[in-house]
Image: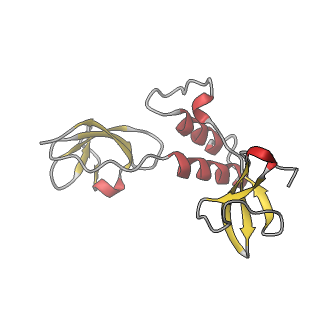
Amino acid sequence: MAEYGPGTVAVATVRGERQRVMFVGWPKGAEGWVSATGQTGPLAGDDVVTDVRPLVVLDLDSLDTAAPDQDETVAQYVVRTLRGPAHGSATRNAIADQIEAQTKPPRIPEPGKYGIVKASLSGDYRSDWVNEGKHWVGLDHTIVAKWDDLVDPALVREGV
């Protein structure tokens, strides 16, 4: 256990089952693994917790990076950069997928009639969309979509 310090978060096998665990230290030198599910008991050692794979923790909020598109977060900028044409590889896409899954806010509820959102159809170009009751229309009135077709909508104005 000495190779892991307090605060190490990992995926490990605990009594034959894969789960997330954290290595903790307590006063008087007690240390060991604890699980979010409580299945490891208060502290478990190497006899119970095996096949430990430490997880990487990214603190994207601490990055001193300004995303070029002011409508995106740092996490969205990192995901877009990883998936970019100059970088697109299976490994980068897998990392981007994991970052996106962990940082993506829940989808907003559909605004009422005449509500406006900023969204895209493919995940690339974002524009304003207006709820005209039965469908959503791009501001140029050439594209019609259903609410479920809009990717990552952000509320601009609530409808009636």
- The image shows residue 92 at horizontal and vertical percentages of 69, 48
Tell me what residue is drawn at x 35 percent, y 50 percent.
Answer: 150
Q: Residue at x 59, y 47 (%)?
A: 99
Q: How is the protein colored in the picture?
A: secondary structure
At 67% from the left edge and 47% from the top edge, which residue is drawn? Answer: 88
Q: Residue furthest front?
A: 28
Given residues 103 and 25, the one toward you in this image is 25
- At which x and y percent is residue 57? 67, 44
Judge whether 128 appears above or below 41 on screen: above
Q: Please state which of residues 95 and 83 is positioned toward the viewer in this rendering.
A: 95
Query: Furthest residue to the left?
Result: 160
* In this rendering, position of residue 84 left or right of residue 23: left
Q: Is residue 85 left or right of residue 15?
A: left
Quadrant for residue 147, please give it: bottom left
The N terminus lies in which quarter of the figure? Answer: bottom right
Q: Quadrant of residue 82?
A: top right
Q: Is residue 83 above or below residue 127?
A: below
- Identify whether 156 is placed above or below 12: above
How many numbered discs? 0
Residue name at image x 72 percent, y 69 percent: 14
Say which of 154 and 37 sits in front: 37
Give the farthest residue toward the right: 2
Give the x, y percent position of residue 5.
80, 45
**The C terminus is located in which quarter?**
top left
Give percent across and percent down for residue 100. 55, 48
